[in-house]
């Protein structure tokens, strides 16, 4: 296999890795907010259910969760597995896993806000929704951004776990070429791709943090 062909195949896999990354953030970041609210709910049943969900997501390997989601329809209901379900299971698995982590980050940020801000907003005539979305949430986002950045960077590397479902992302293709061609060059190229991807994401998040450091 020529270097050009190898590079083309790895670039195709890299595109799929980026797809996993983008879709996971697209679904998990909004999903984490209601999960965080449930975690802080005064309803004991809801709060405990959310605590169990978060505990399971954080306490078991992501790879195991992906395998469970992929095979569960067949094992439990005899539903045949398709290529479409493969990518669906990958995105669902990543999204619900990362939503649990982001939810705890949100919760820590929300609970760190001084009670006085809620009281001041109430005195000024703001409703609960207005208080949260106009006053509290913008400050929470600023506070939690470093922690969110760490999770986003971790997600870049975790996209390689999709290989567990034989989804042909960057790492899966690199591993396949290594087995076929008996060369480690695909792994080196894949490492460069992951590093550049991570560097760009880290740089973008750093710029975002600086732009939100409006008190400095």
Image: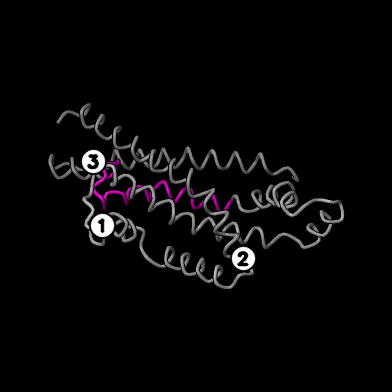
Q: Viewed as shown, does residue 168 lie left or right of 23?
A: left
Q: Nearer the viewer, mark 3 or mark 2?
A: 2
Residue that numbered label 2 is attached to: 40
Q: Viewed as shown, does residue 110 lie left or right of 32?
A: right
Q: Can residue 169 be found in the magenta stretch?
A: yes
Q: How is the image coloured?
A: one colour
Ranked by sequence position, the earlier of labels 1 and 2 is: 2
Nearest the viewer among 76 and 21 is 76
Q: Residue at x 38, y 47 (%)?
A: 91
Most frequent secondary structure within the magenta stretch: helix
Looking at the rendered image, the quarter that the N terminus falls into is: top left
Q: Viewed as shown, does residue 115 lie left or right of 8?
A: right
- x and y percent of residue 143 in the render? 65, 53
Question: Does residue 89 lie above or below 193 as drawn?
Answer: below
Residue that numbered label 3 is attached to: 173
Q: Viewed as shown, does residue 207 lie left or right of 53?
A: right
Ranked by sequence position, the earlier of labels 3 and 2 is: 2
Residue at the outermost top position: 4
Question: Does residue 96 lie above or below 197 as drawn?
Answer: below
Give the spatial CA distance, label 1 vs label 2: 33 Å
Q: Secondary structure at mark 3?
A: helix
Highlighted magenta segment, given as a residue range: 146-171
Q: Secondary structure at mark 1?
A: helix
Q: Secondary structure at mark 2?
A: loop
Looking at the rendered image, the quarter that the C terminus falls into is: top right
Give the spatial CA distance, label 3 vs label 2: 42 Å
Q: Residue at x 53, y 55 (%)?
A: 102
Using the rendered view, name the quadrant where residue 64 is placed. bottom left
Q: Which mark is residue 71?
A: 1
């Amino acid at each position: 296999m020529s270097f050009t062909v190898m590079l083309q195949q790895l670039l195709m896999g890299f595109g799929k890795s980026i797809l996993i990354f983008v879709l996971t953030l697209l679904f998990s970041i909004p999903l984490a907010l209601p999960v965080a609210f449930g975690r802080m709910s005064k309803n004991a049943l809801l709060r405990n259910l959310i605590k169990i969900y978060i505990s399971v997501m954080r306490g078991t390997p992501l790879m195991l969760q992906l395998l469970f989601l992929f095979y569960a329809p067949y094992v439990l209901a005899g539903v045949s597995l398709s290529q479409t379900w493969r990518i669906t299971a990958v995105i669902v698995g990543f999204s619900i896993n990362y939503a649990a982590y982001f939810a705890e980050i949100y919760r820590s940020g929300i609970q760190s806000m001084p009670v006085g801000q809620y009281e001041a907003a109430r005195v000024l005539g703001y409703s609960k929704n207005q208080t949260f979305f106009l006053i509290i949430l913008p400050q929470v986002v600023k506070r939690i951004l470093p922690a969110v950045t760490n999770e986003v960077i971790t997600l870049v590397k975790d996209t390689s776990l999709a290989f567990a479902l034989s989804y042909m992302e960057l790492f899966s293709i690199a591993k396949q070429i290594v087995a076929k061609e008996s060369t480690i060059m695909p792994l080196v190229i894949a490492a460069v791709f992951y590093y550049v991807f991570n560097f760009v994401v880290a740089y973008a998040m750093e710029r975002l943090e600086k732009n939100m450091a409006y008190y400095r």
